[in-house]
Amino acid sequence: MRTCVRCGTAMMENYDIKIEGAANGIVVATDEKKLFPKRIGKPKVAVCPRCGEISFYLDTERLK
């Protein structure tokens, strides 16, 4: 469970990032200089229901 860094409230997790007007999302990759970099994963978003703070995070299992 994630806790908001601003107000200490439990955050709602596992939301996705969508870019308006585009079919592509955001992907975290290892090296931008490579033609086909290794994709680590799509970041997730946690939202604080009290103050609206958002937090981006990755599934750490893919980093190992």
Image (spheres, rainbow, N blue to C red):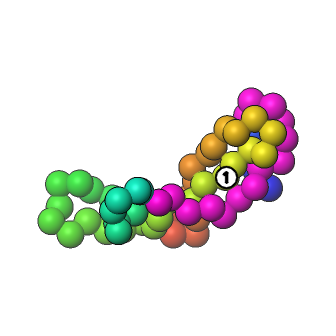
Q: Secondary structure at mark 1?
A: strand
* Extreme-top residue of the structure: 6
Q: Amino acid at mark 1?
A: Ala
Task: Classify the position of the N terminus by image quarter.
Answer: bottom right
Q: Is any part of residue 20 visible from this angle?
A: yes
User: Where is mark 1, residue-wise?
Assistant: 46
Residue 15 percent coordinates (x, y): 62, 61
Front-most of 4 and 60? 4
All told, the count of numbered labels is 1
Residue shown at 23% from the left, 54% from the top: 32
Is residue 10 in the magenta section? yes
Which quadrant of the view contains residue 8?
Answer: top right
- Viewed as shown, does residue 38 lie left or right of 45? left
| 32 relative to 62 in the view: left or right | left
Q: Residue at x 67, y 52 (%)?
A: 46
**Of helix, strand and loop, which mostly describes the magenta segment?**
loop
Place of residue 62 in the rendered image (x, y in percent of width and height, measured from the top left):
51, 69
Q: State the residue lying farthest toward the right.
A: 9
Q: Residue at x 40, y 63 (%)?
A: 25
Q: Residue at x 58, y 69 (%)?
A: 61
Provide the residue span drawn in magenta: 5-18
